[in-house]
């Protein structure tokens, strides 16, 4: 159970980073 929770945490963090980078690149292009 703990390993699954850790994986979900990592996936959530990676998704958050991707969203932030997408927003920054979008603002950078405009």
Image: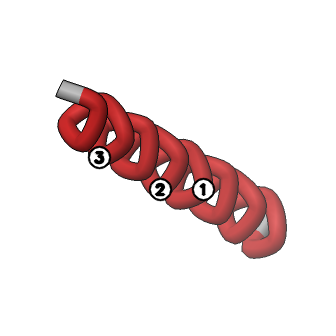
| Badge 2 vs badge 1, beta-carbon distance below 8 Å | yes
Residue pointed to by mark 1: 17
Query: Which mark's residue is nearer the viewer, 3 or 2?
Result: 3
In the foreground, 17 or 10: 10
Residue pointed to by mark 2: 14
Gap between marks 1 and 3 measured at Cα:
15 Å
Q: Secondary structure at mark 3?
A: helix
| Residue at 55% across, 44% down | 16
Label 2 CA crowd tier, 10 Å (few <14, some 14–19, many 20+):
few
Q: Is residue 29 left or right of residue 11?
A: right
Task: Note whether 26 is above or below 8 in the view shown.
Answer: below
Gap between marks 3 and 2 measured at Cα:
11 Å
In the foreground, 9 or 12: 9
Q: How many marks?
A: 3
* Quadrant occupied by the C terminus: bottom right
| Residue at 76% across, 61% down | 24
Q: Where is residue 11? Give x, y as percent.
A: 35, 48
Q: Which mark is residue 7?
A: 3
Label 1 CA crowd tier, 10 Å (few <14, some 14–19, many 20+):
few
| Residue at 17% across, 26% down | 1
């Amino acid at each position: 159970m703990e390993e699954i929770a850790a994986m979900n945490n990592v996936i959530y963090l990676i998704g958050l980073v991707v969203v932030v980078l997408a927003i920054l690149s979008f603002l950078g292009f405009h």
